[in-house]
Image (cartoon, rainbow, N blue to C red):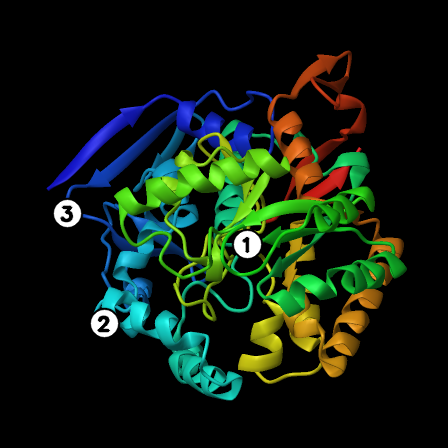
Amino acid sequence: MIQSQSQDNQPIHRILSGYYKTPAFFTGAVHCDASSNGSGFFRLGPDIVCYGECSTGVTADVENSGSCDAYRALQVSKSGLHLPFHIDRVIDDLRMEHYVRHLNADEKRLVQSKIIRRAYYLVRAPLPIWVRRHLQRAYFRDWQKLSFPHWPVDSTVDSLHELILRLAMQAQGCRKVPFIWFWPKSAAGCVILTHDVETTAGRDFVPTLMDMDQAHGFRASFQVVPEKRYEITDKLVREIQDRGFEFNIHDLNHDGHLFEDKNEFLLRVAKINKYGKKYGARGFRSGAMYRNQDWLDAFDFSYDMSVPNVAHFEPQRGGCCTVMPYFNGRILELPLTTSQDYTVFHILNERVIDLWKKQIKLIRDKNGLLSFLSHPDYLIDSQCRAVYNTLLAHLRQLVDQDGLWTALPSEVDRWWRARSNMKLVPDGTAWRIEGPESEQASVAYAMLDGDRIIYALK
């Protein structure tokens, strides 16, 4: 049964204001037809895969989503928009990874079994490294068969925002719409470096890794496991913070079980929150990128970094399908938009930065967040360390040439929160920005260019 629901323009305004910080220019009605037959995959044209309810049909198999193309049902007129789905729900389902329940529906992956996963983590420590890597490569052997999210970077959510902005502009007859640029001081994008410390050897290598980052003009955040793995000394905390780096919390004990049971999760979160307060940490990342985004409101942190953009090489598959930060309730999510060093070095067995360079280009095309995760534990190896230095040199060149913003995760958190409270107000024939830190913000314009949107700074 198909239900037709007429809505006002609030969903569209909320989407455009949340992502672009546009003024309220769209005054037409929004009509959404939502199917009552459940959620599934569908497409908008040849390139955009969506998940949710859609009146033109959905499929449980992402491979067949091309048979459910909702683009033909989009209607644009002066009176408003007709959409065969609720765009705000589709965006939320993608970012929150609700679509994962339909990925590999016909396959029971070993990692989904609590017994198998607990057994692996029980014997993991005494296993030789080469055995662990062999098991991990075997688990990830099917990664090339995964068509969604799109590898090596998925920007579906960002493309959906561009599409909705274009449709709203066409409905209103606008060729040019102002918005608040994504990054401070007109930066073309943002770069953050993060390091997860997993072992005693990695902890002891932290000062050397800070030297490497600083040699290229970068600072980074260090995520440290607060229990069982190694001792956290006051000297280490002070050195990280005194050198302008950031100290964050990495799981509780990194045993892979944080999100297995809600009651156990809440008990562990109480301890994690205490460690966050003890060390003055504003950010968190879970062990092995395990996550349940619907539970994150239990944390007291300001931001989280546990969600990959594409999780083809993570124990938990999925991905948030955006290269931009986004709010999950009161917590800001800073997605991991590039591959971990462990993936590059030990799963793909590469000793070059070619994959990172490809991801960098795709993210820069969307003016997104370039977030990197490397481990001091793996960079002890001289060959891996040389590759990481090559990556730093490449990033330094891009920053200097293209005006990228290099920041700590906490600085991105502060900026994104400030930007969310800014607004554009008319100033004669122009626009000005009001709100916290507005002196750092820039007015930009979205302009129609055929069937696409292009951006230009004031």
Residue 294 seen in this snapshot = no
The residue positioned 17% from the left and 35% from the top of the image is 3
Q: Residues within 10 Å of mark 3 (few under 14, many from 20)?
A: few
Image height check: is 15 above or below 36? above
Asked which quadrant contains residue 146, the reply is bottom left
Amino acid type of disc 2? Lys
User: What residue did someone put label 2 on?
Assistant: 108
Amino acid type of disc 1? Val
Q: Earlier in the sequence, mark 2 or mark 3?
A: 3
| Secondary structure beneath label 1 | loop
Residue 432 screen position, x and y as percent: 75, 19
Q: Quadrant of the N terminus?
A: top left
User: What residue did someone put label 3 on?
Assistant: 37
Q: CA distance from mark 2 to mark 1?
A: 30 Å
Amino acid type of disc 3? Asn
Mark 2, mark 3: which one is toward the viewer? 2
User: What residue did someone put label 1 on?
Assistant: 225
* Residue situated in front as seen by the camera: 169 or 147: 147
Q: Earlier in the sequence, mark 3 or mark 1?
A: 3
